[in-house]
Amino acid sequence: MARPVGISTIAYNNVVWGDDFAERTRDEMAKYLEMAAQAKPDLVLFPECCTTIGVPSEPAKGRERYETWAETVPGPTTDRMAELADKYNMYVVVPLVERDGDRLYNTAAFIDRNGRIIGKYHKYQPTIGEMEDGIIPGTDAEAFDTDFGKVGAAICFDIKYVEVGQRLAANRARLVCFASAFVAGQRLLHWARDFGFYILSSCTRRSYIVDMAGTRFLAETGFQIDEVASGVVPPIASAVVNMDREFFHLDYNQERLKECVAKYGAGVEWEICRPEAHFTLASNMDDRTIEDLIEEFEFELYRDYFARARTYRVDTLSRAER
């Protein structure tokens, strides 16, 4: 059935440095989160390390700088955002430098509608500089269960690494929250196209919402936009996406798609992408989910098709060597 979900990005740009920086940062984050809440979003995302944007590189450097500003999760910032998540019945993703025992992580903390921490994503591929300064890499790109589907995360440099997108797809993320210090641009479209999930990005300079087929940006904001930089509009962008949608390759699925459309007509919604040879399919019906359609017509998901092809390759080589 149609599952409309409101998602919002905040291209947060931190307050001026000063003695009470940490508390004023939380006040600013809360202010923008209250503004975003007016659109009644289901999920809101902040940029990478949003609690330390604007912290000067001097006098603390390297690991000392991370250790100075790292927080536990839960901790003061996630607690403050959790209050608003509960108040406005929304998920909030808070990226920050996390201290967990004697380890430091570049983390995206997932807070649910009741203000509870439901998951933490640790940046899978930190930069060399981050690792030199003590940031420990994550070991997987999990997808966390929400009441509208599985949601995963990636952080900044992650997007340069195909294995991160592959793990998110393998873990069946239907939406990926990309928190970053750099814009990423066309790579966001490439990831959506190659792995088949919506992307909600958050970067101070430019943030985007990307459709599942990787064909377009659904919304954008950021301080590279004149009206945002001049204060005419806030650094917030929102869109409503149908989470009852999945991603398929055309191979082996064309006849199935034909039968599905013949039976349900406008009850389903599709987008065929050529020359890429893939498509998305969504249910708009009250009594049929995309999972129901996959089962009924035996559609093969994009990620499953490629996994099958990889396995078949190995088997073929094995037979050839006998």
Image (spheres, grey):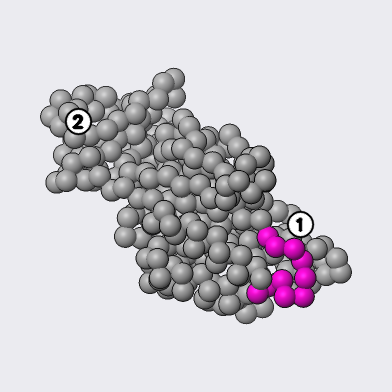
Image coordinates of residue 105 in percent, x first then y, are: 63, 66
Position of 50 relative to 291 (above/below) = below
The kind of secondary structure element at disc 2 is helix
Amino acid bearing label 2: Ala
Q: Residue at x 75, y 63 (%)?
A: 16
Distance from disc 2 to disc 1, alpha carbons, whole Å, reads: 52 Å
| Front position in the image: 320 or 312 | 312
Give the label, 2 or 1, closer to the camera. Answer: 2
Q: Residue at x 46, y 69 (%)?
A: 84
Residues drawn in magenta: 14-23
Q: Would residue 88 be counted in the magenta stretch?
A: no
Crowding near the residue tagged with mark 1, few <14, some 14–19, many ≥20 C-alpha atoms within 10 Å: few
- Mark 2 — residue? 266
Amino acid bearing label 1: Gly
Q: Residue at x 60, y 46 (%)?
A: 232
Position of 14 relative to 244 (above/below) = below
Position of 240 relative to 94 (above/below) = above
- Mark 1 — residue? 129
* Residue 35 seen in this snapshot: yes
